[in-house]
Image (cartoon, rainbow, N blue to C red):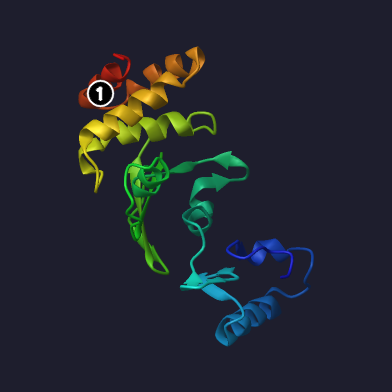
Amino acid sequence: MDRFSRGYVFTYVDFVGKVKSKEALVKSLNRLAESGRIVKLAKGKYYKSELSPFGELPPEQYQVVKDQLDRDGKAVGYLTGLSIYNKLGLTTQIGSVIQIGRQEVRSPFKRERYTISFVKQNTITKENIPLLQLLDLLRFIEKIPDTKIEKSIATSKQLVAELSDQQQEKIMRLALKYQPSTRALLGQCWQI
């Protein structure tokens, strides 16, 4: 377990080939969680917590939901919503809801202190994720807390201006699957 960094979420799979008995591993991990040496995030998911002057830090949101984002090295989902708006500096809020864009959506569920919810999405590839996140920003622009729409549009314009010609063509194709209001806002981002 020393090979895992603090905040890294690990599962039984990370020990395959290193232990002989899965049952013994499960019991051992649960004992470590009960003793406080590791934290149980959800069934079969654990992490070593990191301490700060303000107390115990939770793992990064990506770590909490990475099993919902990647399957066998292929992107099946991506972070969207508050976590992206915060990363872009549009809001200072960090919510207890982690929103994920996926092709097949499911009912929201809880994982420790987080509620994981899903937004229906198409055409998810590792290369498309930043473009889909930008389109989601435009799609939900009125729902971004703690910011003005003008600031969100200015940030969107800056992000569009930084796209390569190939990325600009791709985002226009991806936008065809979004609502007309999102496509209109994207068009406004080209008016600099």
In this view, 126 is above or below 34: above
Q: Position of residue 15 (x, y in %)?
A: 72, 65
Give the quadrant of the N terminus.
Answer: bottom right
In this view, 55 is above or below 140: below
Q: Look at 78% across and 73% down and name the residue there.
A: 20
Residue 47: name its quadrant. bottom right
Which residue is the site of mark 1?
A: 185
Q: Look at 31% across and 20% down and name the residue there.
A: 189
Q: Position of residue 141 (x, y in %)?
A: 25, 36
Q: Amino acid at mark 1?
A: Leu
In the foreground, 55 or 41? 55
Q: Is residue 123 shown to the viewer in this render?
A: no
In the foreground, 157 or 186? 157
Q: Look at 74% across and 75% down and name the residue there.
A: 21
Q: Look at 59% across and 87% down and name the residue there.
A: 35
Give the quadrant of the C terminus.
Answer: top left
Q: Position of residue 118 (x, y in %)?
A: 35, 48
The kind of secondary structure element at disc 1 is: helix
